[in-house]
Amino acid sequence: MDNHDNNEYSLKEVQAGNRSEFAKLIDVHSDQIFRLAIKILGNEQDAEDVLQNTFLKAFQKIGSFEGRSNVSTWLYRIATNEALMTIRKRRPEINISEFTNEENEEIESPIQFIDWCCLPENELLSEETREVMDEAINQLSEALKIVFILRDIEGVSIQETGQILNLSETAVKTRLLRARLKLREKLTTYFGERLTDRSE
């Protein structure tokens, strides 16, 4: 995450309307915004649209940015909102209010999981395993998936994830744990088969 004044651009100059400095801001942050969008949406064209709309809105609103969070956190919030609007257009049956609704943030009772300790590291990191992991992430509910992507994939802090999604830190931690449990449950079958194959 960046500081309020990034070494590669001057935030004060950006806020003063300096377009060349804003172009530098785009260069610094565009990769992470695109990566976030494509992980949430799974579609390059949609991710490109989110990227463009994020920086268009950032340019329009940068003058009112108060520096209460990092620039990257602020951009992530804009991008996440843009991605959610895309999801709502694609899947109108989804209730977007669930993303900021902290009711029923209960953790399901954990089930019995396969112990993966006996699998070699190269098998855990194989291309096939990554594909299985990506598929499992995509099967999470949107509310859990976004928290997991921000915290565990992008490395955004619990506090910043809460700021981005307008959630309390407790709700972020609860959703993150629920996401991890669901992923572990889905992956248990896959790794259980690998262990069975090795024991035969």
Image (tube, helix red, strand yellow):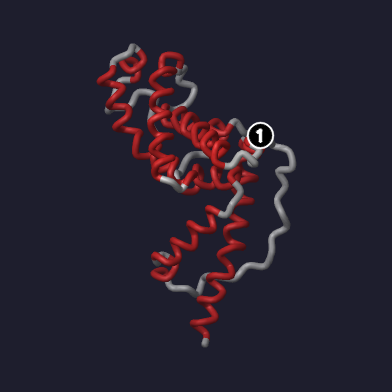
Label 1 neighbour load within 10 Å: few <14, some 14-19, many 20+: few
User: What's the residue at 47%, 17% (across, down)?
Assistant: 66
**Rendering quarter of residue 29:** top left
User: What's the residue at 63%, 41% (across, down)?
Assistant: 94
Camera sees residue 142: yes
Instruction: Name above or below for residue 165 compared with residue 180.
Output: above
Between 93 and 15, the one nearer to me in the picture: 93
Q: Tell me where residue 104 appears, x and y as whole percent.
A: 74, 42
Q: Which residue is mark 1?
A: 97
Instruction: Name above or below for residue 61 compared with residue 181.
Output: above
User: What's the residue at 28%, 25% (across, down)?
Assistant: 23
Q: Residue furthest top?
A: 16
Relative to 92, is 117 on the left or the right?
left
Q: Tell me where residue 149 appears, x and y as whole percent.
A: 50, 46
Between 121 and 196, the one nearer to me in the picture: 196
Q: Tell me where residue 82 appears, x and y as whole percent.
A: 49, 32
**Rendering quarter of residue 27:** top left
Amino acid type assigned to the residue bearing label 1 in the image: Ser
Q: Residue furthest left?
A: 20
Q: Secondary structure at mark 1?
A: helix
Relative to 94, is 195 on the left or the right?
left
Instruction: Name above or below for residue 154 compared with residue 109.
Output: above
Quadrant where the N terminus is found in the figure: top left
Camera sees residue 160: no
Q: Tell me where residue 106 appears, x and y as whole percent.
A: 72, 47
User: What's the residue at 27%, 28% (across, down)?
Assistant: 8
